[in-house]
Image (spheres, rainbow, N blue to C red):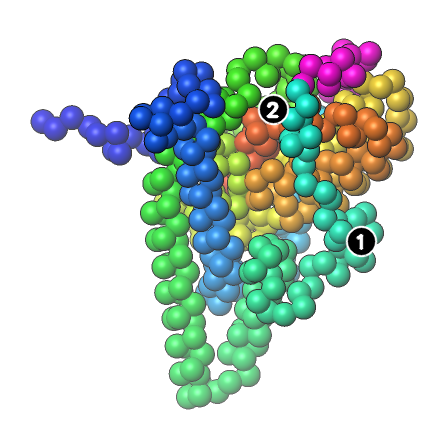
Amino acid sequence: MNKPSYFALPLYVQVVVGVAAGALLGVLFGTESYGFNLFSNAALGQLGQLVIRLLKALAAPLVFFAILDAMIHTDISLKHGRRLLALCSINLAVAMIIGLTLMNTLRPGHLWEGRLTAMTNQLDHGTSRLMPKSVPENLTLDPLKNLAGYIPKSLAEPFVENNMIAIILLALLVGGAIRQLKRQTADEDQAGLVMLEKSIGVGCRLLIQMLLWVVKAIPFAVFGVVAQVVGKAGLEVFELVAVFLAAMLGGLLIHALAYYPGMVKWGGGMPVKRYFSEGADAIVTGLSTNSSLATMPVTLRCLTENMGISNRSARLSVCIGTNLNNDGIILYEAMAALFLAQAIGIELNFAQQLVIIAAAIMVGVGISGIPEAGLIALPLVLSTAGLPEALVVTAVPLITTIDWIIARFRSGVNVMNDMLIAILLDRLDKTNH
């Protein structure tokens, strides 16, 4: 009998092996070269990032084709759209209640009082390299300016800039136009539309197949990225910000491991064990790639093939609702702002905390699937909270040292939310029929 090979192991097991091996390599060699000076942890990390970049490049057109295919072959009615918005709003409201309760009850930010400057001084002078990119000009709290940022100047612009909301709007527009033409065109004149529909379906399947091939390289990408991060920062870097890390992960884990399983069981009528076991590949892929967008093909496969969720419910949640199912990043942004306000002794009343939540929601829309985007948006949310600019400049580098961990949990929560919404939508469909 042949022994099972590494490649026969489930994806999440391969990912765990990659994380452990990468951490070990990072501890052993740090930033030094090895293997006759031909290899280094930094080089491995760069190779791993190429895999993630390819995932993002393929995922964007897949969203476009998947939405088109869904609009052509499934009934996406106003009723289903209302259900999607309602379920996303309920999940988001629970996330905010959890975040506000934790921050106002435990008040973990007070443990940083008087220590923020001292902790910053412990970092070397290269900390400025860890600062996030400047906030994009089109990322504001003005709803009209946000809306303008979603309307492309050309049909190619959304794909070039990877603007997911613009891609979704474009796909909805094209899909709606095709549906309208089908209703207006006589049966004998629909040959061209039939050919177009078949081409869209083939394009969707081709992109899914390519993405599934790239997904097989994810464990190797994780191995390289972990080796680079641990080799450069070391394991002791986490001691500086353990309180912040515990507070952020606490909120995310309560939402993911208490609220989601409850909704799956009582709202979706699915055993919790099945939700985690049959969705494990998607959850761990989201954790490892730090992108719910890049995880999309794996999420769709887990929902339709493993859980038996209908294509319509799965695509409505994962493809169309992916920019709404971002509990992870919104919960993090709000909790981080409240934490840092507590750290410098600023007492925010309930109304001021609601303003922070509104800011987190605004900046969270459209960036949930993009790795590290939460850190780019964080300075805007912190400024909205009324925190001094000096604090923002001081605190963000500290947060950056461990954000790669929190970011992966944010993405994992977003993937779990995608699956939960699909399960609930499918249950509602079956109940009403």
Residue 280 lies in the magenta-colored region: no
**Mark 2 or 1, closer to the camera:** 2
Task: Give the image location of residue 314, x and y in percent.
Answer: 49, 49
Circle 2 is placed at which residue position?
A: 402
Task: Give the image location of residue 422, x and y in percent.
Answer: 52, 45
> Between residues 48 and 32, which one lies in front from this camera angle?
32
Task: Give the image location of residue 223, x and y in percent.
Answer: 40, 29
Residue at the image position 58 percent from the left and 55 percent from the top: 162
Please identify the quarter of the rendering in which residue 204 is found. bottom left
Q: Secondary structure at mark 2?
A: helix
Give the crowd class for mark 2: few <14, some 14-19, many >=20 residues within 10 Å.
Answer: many
Magenta-colored span:
101-123
Give the crowd class for mark 1: few <14, some 14-19, many >=20 residues within 10 Å.
Answer: few
* Magenta span: chief secondary structure: helix
- Quarter of the picture holding the N terminus: top left
Q: Secondary structure at mark 1?
A: helix
First in residue order: circle 2 vs circle 1: 1
Give the amino acid type for the residue marked by disc 2 in the picture. Ile
Is residue 281 in view from this perspective?
Answer: no
